[in-house]
Structure formats: structure tokens, C-alpha cells
Amino acid sequence: MILHTLNRSPLESTVYRQALRALAEDDKLLLIEDGVLGALPAQQALWSSLPGRLLALAEDLEARGLSEHCATGIEVIDVDGFVRLTEEADKVVSWY
Amino acid sequence: MASTETARTLDLGQASVPLDPEGYLVNLDDWSPAVAEALAAEEGITLGDEHWQVIDVLRDFYARFEQAPAMRPLVKAVGQALGKDKGSSLYLMKLFPGSPPKLGARLAGLPKPTNCL
Amino acid sequence: MIEEPNDDSGDLLVILRHGPHGTSYLKEGLDTALVAAAFGRRVSLLFLASGVAALVPGQGAGPLGQKGTQPTLAMLEMYDIDRLFVDGAGLAELGVAPETLTPDATVIEGDAIAALMAEHALVLTF
């Protein structure tokens, strides 16, 4: 499993499309920094190919006041969870 | 990249050319065979045919690719131009002791190679 | 230590996602690839999205004399970097014909991108 991180808002950057093209079937995508804007319900059509494999970083949601607005179906993890996931993954690839 | 800072000058008799702190030419256009000979003399090296062949390969490499080569590509370029027997790090170490890419680039009037230790 | 290659996979995949001149990403990615190759790592390159612009022929120096990247691309073979891949979707989006690319690169699409990433021990995006 490759852990992909995305730190840009899908409204601002199309780099999420590169990440989606590069994701293998068992890879996971973690939204961090401005990437967490992609965790809002209105953005969920972008991630239809990723059921159960989309995560968002709690601290970045919280800092933006978005914790309560995160779409259902997204797994919210904190930094410790991020670190554990990094250890589980074969490698980490960042999309920025 | 060549440094623009002049640390000292190389004396060529009637002329002198500025060198950067590591002994590379400040102005690459200053290079001439006489410059190479003077720089080599400082290292206790007398340039022979085998040195000049490699210097030609280095200058050709830079003209084509705009960068001085690290060891691996230098070995490959020398092998392609001068034959397999000369395309070895041992052969190049004999001609340009220490670091062939660095000393070679310095004598050939190239900037310091960026991708080598 | 340099490990002996025991299969077709490479050590490092450098993904280049930016064309020449606009940013320094392309140059930095190529520098990273060259350093790794100079130390004996087996390096592959993937030109993805806007990165395919790096392979368009006829490029030159920037308007202020900034060096172009085509001489560096031509130099890759001297560093034994000969596994070059290009994103088919990126080519289509920019309307660039794959047969014109310089240097030549293998067009990959769909799952092949994920497979390429999986077969390299390290993947870096620039």
C-alpha cells in the first residue's frame, strides 16, 4: 500500500487529478493542510473511486473549523494515526 | 556553476586570469591550453597526449550538455570517445589524481561538477 | 552501499510534474535524479501532467538567459538514466503528439502509472 498525501485544495489546484491517476486499488489518500477542503460534502463527487480509502487529518480540519463539516465516509485520523499509517505503508508519496 | 568570486589570479607571464576560491576559472572564456598547462603545473602534472584527450572529452561534454560530468558519466564519455580500455576510473585516476571529475573540469576550464562529491 | 539489481524494478522514480522555465521544480527533480544516478542508483523518470512539456522539442533558454532543460535531458543517458515514461493523459490534455517527444519516452496510462510507482523503492514528486 502506498500512502498518498494531498495538501492542496481541489478548488485551487488540479493536482488531486494527478494523485487520482496514480492511486493503485489498495492505496490510500490522506488529505492534509489545504487538502482538507476536499473533505467537505460538496467535494465528494471527486473521490467516488475511493470508497473507504480517503482520510483527512484531524488537526488540519480543526484548525480550519471544519471538523463538524467533514463528509461521512471519510476516516479522520490525527497526527499519531498519520505516523502509524506511514509505518504501515510501503512508501509515502506527496502531491503538492 | 562557476563562482563569480575571485580568490586569486593565475599568472601566465604576460597575462593573468582570475580563479574562484576552489581554483576554477571565474570567466570560462579565459580558458586556453596555456591556462590548462599552468593549472596542471600547480598540481605537479605535466599534460601529455592522454591528458589532452580527456580534456577534449570534457570540453565536448560541456558543449553538448552545459554541465560538467560526475565520475560515472565521465567514464562513459571517455569510453565512448577514446575506447573501452580508457573508459575506466582507474585510468582517469592515474591522469587526474584525487577526483578526476573535479580536477579534470578545472583543467578543462569547466565549472565545478555539481552532481559529484 | 550499492545493492546489486536483482529484478527489473528501479531504486528511485522521480515524477516530474512541471514544464521548463515556470518554476524550478523540473530542474530540481532532474538534479535529484542525476545525483542518485551518480551514486549508482537505478533511476526512472515519469513526466506527468504539465511535466510532459519538458519533452516538447525546440525549447531554448529563457527570456532572461536562464538555461533550458533540454541539454540536461540529453545528458540523462550518460548517467545511465534510460527508463523515461510519459503520461498519456497529460499528452492528450496538451495536444502533444508522442512521436515528437525529445528525448523519446514510453507512453503509459491508467493502471500502468500505479504499477510503475509500486515497482520503485522510493518515489519523489517534483
Image: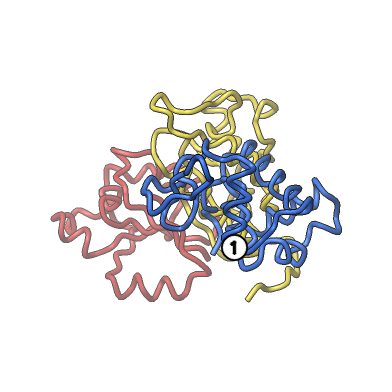
Image spot of residue C105 (x, y percent): 67, 39
Q: Disc 1 sits on a residue from what chain?
A: B
Disc 1: CA contacts within 10 A as few (<14), some (14-19) or many (>=20): few
Q: Going by the image, does C7 lie left or right of C88?
A: right
Amino acid at circle 1:
Glu
What element does badge 1 sit on? Answer: loop
Instruction: Give the residue drawn at x 43%, y 55%.
Output: A51
Q: Position of residue C96 (x, y in %)?
A: 59, 25
| Residue B11 picture location, percent across and down | 49, 49
Q: Quadrant of the C terminus of chain B?
A: bottom right
Q: Relative to residue B34, is residue C62 depicted above or below?
A: above
Relative to the observer, which residue lies in front, C26 or B72?
B72
What is the drawing colour of chain C? yellow
Task: Please say which color scheme the image uses.
Answer: by chain
Q: How many numbered marks appear?
A: 1
Between A38 and A5, the one lying in front of the other is A5
Q: Residue at x 43, y 33 (%)?
A: C66
**Chain letter for the blue colouring in the rendering:** B
Question: For mark 1, what is the residue?
Answer: B43
Q: Quadrant of residue A13?
A: top left
Q: Left or right: A87 with respect to B110?
A: left
C59, C100: nearer the viewer: C59
Q: Residue furthest front?
A: B14
Identify the chain drawn in red.
Answer: A
Q: Which residue is depicted at the point 24% across and 55% down?
A: A70
Residue B30 at x, y percent in the picture: 52, 38
Can the viewer see residue C41? no
